[in-house]
């Protein structure tokens, strides 16, 4: 077995690999960029090596620097994680020539599966179901029109070298086809340096279901069941689960058999994933093969009780698989939610900055958190905005969903915006709970974006009652600190008004045996908790049900977070609440004459000049953040009065870029 491995990656996946290597008694080497000098994965590893600048192109994608790190540290093998160099055939070749083991598949598999056109042709030859389409290179827009008419609309135009949701367009008629071909090719050229485009039939009501495969160097190949990955936003997975609520044992076996056939056709070894698109009638078609560990691998690990990273390491060392297909059983249900630093209420714009407060849900047999950050960590503009993967496991799907809701409530993140409210809304959605999923789920259920009105709240009085009890506990603490315990009962006020998001809730708060009672109109909320002031997490029993609420003290009240909802409260005496109606609210300044940066990032392009008349829809500027370029366009016809920044400047959120006349 290897004595030392290098992890050619960062963040949560680097930490994930280090944990398994440590359990196996293998020393680890972390690599890092300038931005990651103090990162958690660097401190977890036994050794570390500096690669270069903060940008990926200056560090994690620098093959020469990674090879130098291997030589300097004496690592015997490399685990690439996912992304970066994980599916780079040249990197695998360089390791092979240097006598270093690659904890991943052979070069043949990487090369053949890395090209979407070649992979589909190879899949068809291996007897794998493929989507009807044209798998050769489309020459031009007219050629695209001819092919699309033959296939029959709707058609998906896809970049051969594509990935991560880029280089894809659905076209439903000739006009969309012409425009879609040109834009897809331009995006493919920009993103991948390869503008080859192919076409395939677009499957209506599609599900994205993938099969995990595992193979050794001795010809043994098995599958570990499926993952349902249909909940996607702009082709990026948001929630995954295993098993799928849609598949039956017969379809699972058919898909598994075809995944194994494809893996054998490319002499696959290591852990990999064969992805399928599945229609409403359980017809399934090959989509692509990822020749690496997947982000969503934890759900498979939980339902199969297998450590995929350990299998990858042992296979790379030449060992035979320790399990056979008959040993694989799917037990229970696992759900994974990707927690991102992004603002779901501002079209999911990325958020960067320091995590001023960070507390993960406690890990247990039910809850797993794969993260590469901690309190004080920086979410950088240079990398993917993922904070963590939150995974829950239970005997049934309903129980796993309920556990996810509780875990999201307990996830305390401050300093950056995050998508916890969106995740809570997704898992609470009746259609999600029913398992009625397609890759169009988010687009169909939130066609105009995600708004505060979309946040689920079963009983809005629960957080109000919690706030009232927190206030009562705070009042009790004041009496105890001041030594006035003897005046305790007769001086503590019972009548309060909780003002929540502008609405008044008159309540009476009473101390009773083993807790408190909060009375509001005809309702009574019996609350038991051991919460103490200063703790941002309130664990309580409310009328017998377990509740987890987050409290941030603000003025005469709290900002409360529960099930994704954010509620601003003030706790006032009845007289104070009556006076509140006479307070004049401060009006925010009028910024309509400015173009504001919607996110922190780098201004990569100014597309206008002073005095220029710009029409609605035309680009004004472009801001880059989290590896994505965001084009900012005029919403009305405007004239540019002033340019307030320069190309290359780092921008803060809501920083003015342009002023209009």
Image (cartoon, grey):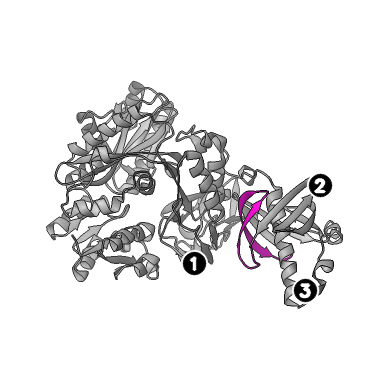
Mark 2 or mark 3: name the one nearer the start of the chain: 3
State which quadrant residue 567 falls in: bottom right
Q: Give the range drawn in magenta.
A: 532-557
Distance from label 2 to label 3 (Cα)?
Answer: 30 Å
User: Which residue is drawn at the image coordinates 71% and 65% (left, top)?
Assistant: 473
Tell me the chief SS of the magenta region. strand
Counting from the top left corner in percent of width and height, residue 262 is at: 22, 35
Give residue 521's mark: 2
Name which of mark 1 and mark 2 comes first in the sequence. Answer: 1
The answer to whether marks 1 and 2 mark residues whose Cβ atoms lie closer than 8 Å is no
Residue under pointer 3: 485
- Name the quarter where the C terminus is drawn: bottom right
The image shows residue 288, relative to residue 383, as above or below, that is above
Residue identifier under label 1: 375
Q: Residues within 10 Å of mark 1 (few under 14, many from 20)?
A: some
Say left or right for 555 vs 440: right
Real-space Cα separation, disc 1 to disc 3, in angstroms: 38 Å
Residue 548 lies within the magenta run: yes
């Amino acid at each position: 077995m290897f004595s030392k491995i290098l992890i050619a990656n960062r963040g949560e996946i680097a930490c994930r690999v280090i944990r398994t290597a440590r359990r196996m008694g293998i020393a680890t080497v972390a690599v890092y960029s300038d931005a990651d000098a103090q990162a958690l994965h660097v401190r977890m590893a036994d050794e570390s090596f500096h690669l270069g600048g903060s940008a990926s192109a200056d560090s994690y994608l620098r093959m020469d620097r990674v090879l130098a790190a291997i030589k300097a540290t004496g690592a015997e093998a490399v685990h690439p994680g996912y992304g970066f160099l994980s599916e780079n055939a040249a990197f695998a070749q360089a390791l092979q020539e240097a006598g270093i083991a690659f904890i991943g598949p052979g070069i043949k598999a990487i090369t053949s599966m890395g090209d979407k056109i070649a992979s589909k042709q190879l899949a068809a030859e291996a007897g794998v179901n493929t989507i009807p389409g044209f798998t050769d290179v489309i020459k031009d827009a007219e050629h695209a029109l001819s092919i699309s008419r033959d296939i029959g609309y709707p058609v998906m135009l896809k970049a051969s070298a594509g990935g991560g949701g880029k280089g894809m367009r659905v076209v439903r008629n000739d006009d969309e086809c012409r425009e879609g071909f040109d834009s897809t090719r331009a995006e493919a050229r920009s993103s991948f340096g390869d503008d080859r485009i192919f076409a395939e039939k677009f499957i209506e009501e599609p599900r994205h279901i993938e099969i995990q495969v595992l193979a050794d160097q001795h010809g043994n190949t098995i599958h570990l069941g499926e993952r349902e990955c249909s909940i996607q936003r702009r082709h990026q997975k948001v929630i995954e689960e295993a098993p799928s609520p849609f598949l039956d044992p017969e379809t699972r076996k058919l898909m598994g058999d075809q995944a194994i056939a494809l893996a054998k056709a490319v002499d696959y070894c290591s852990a990999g994933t064969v992805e399928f698109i599945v229609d409403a009638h359980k017809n399934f078609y090959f989509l692509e093969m990822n020749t690496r560990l997947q982000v969503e691998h934890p759900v498979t690990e939980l339902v199969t009780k297998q450590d995929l990273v350990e299998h990858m390491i042992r296979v790379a060392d030449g060992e035979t698989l320790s399990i056979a297909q008959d040993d694989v059983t799917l037990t229970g249900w696992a759900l994974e939610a990707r927690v991102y630093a992004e603002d779901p209420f501002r079209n999911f714009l990325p958020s960067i900055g320091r995590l001023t407060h960070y507390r993960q849900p406690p890990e247990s047999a039910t809850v797993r958190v794969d993260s590469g950050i901690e309190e004080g960590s920086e979410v950088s503009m240079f990398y993917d905005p993922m904070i963590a993967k939150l995974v829950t496991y239970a005997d049934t799907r309903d129980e796993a969903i309920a556990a996810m809701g509780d875990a999201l409530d307990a996830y305390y993140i401050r300093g950056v915006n995050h998508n916890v409210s969106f995740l809570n809304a997704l898992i609470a959605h009746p259609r999600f709970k029913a398992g009625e999923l397609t890759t169009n789920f988010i687009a169909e259920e939130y066609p105009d974006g995600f708004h505060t009105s979309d946040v689920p709240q079963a009983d809005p009085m629960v957080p109000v009652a919690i706030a009232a009890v927190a206030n009562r506990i705070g009042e009790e603490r004041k009496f105890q600190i001041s030594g006035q315990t003897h005046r305790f009962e007769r001086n503590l006020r019972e009548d309060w008004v909780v003002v929540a998001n502008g609405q008044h809730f008159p309540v009476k708060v009473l101390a009773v045996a083993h807790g408190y009672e909060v009375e509001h109109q005809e309702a009574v909320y019996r609350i038991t908790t051991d919460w103490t002031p200063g703790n941002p997490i309130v664990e309580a029993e409310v009328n017998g049900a377990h509740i987890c609420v987050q409290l941030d003290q603000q003025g005469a009240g709290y900002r409360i977070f529960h099930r994704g909802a954010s509620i601003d409260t003030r706790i006032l005496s009845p007289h104070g609440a009556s006076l509140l109606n006479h307070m004049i609210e401060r009006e925010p300044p009028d910024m309509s004459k400015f173009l504001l940066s919607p996110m922190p990032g780098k201004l990569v392009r100014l597309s206008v000049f002073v005095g220029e008349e710009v029409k609605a829809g035309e680009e004004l500027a472009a801001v880059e953040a989290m590896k994505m370029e965001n084009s900012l366009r005029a919403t009305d016809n405007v004239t540019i009065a002033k340019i307030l920044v320069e190309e290359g400047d780092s921008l803060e959120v809501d920083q003015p870029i342009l002023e209009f006349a």
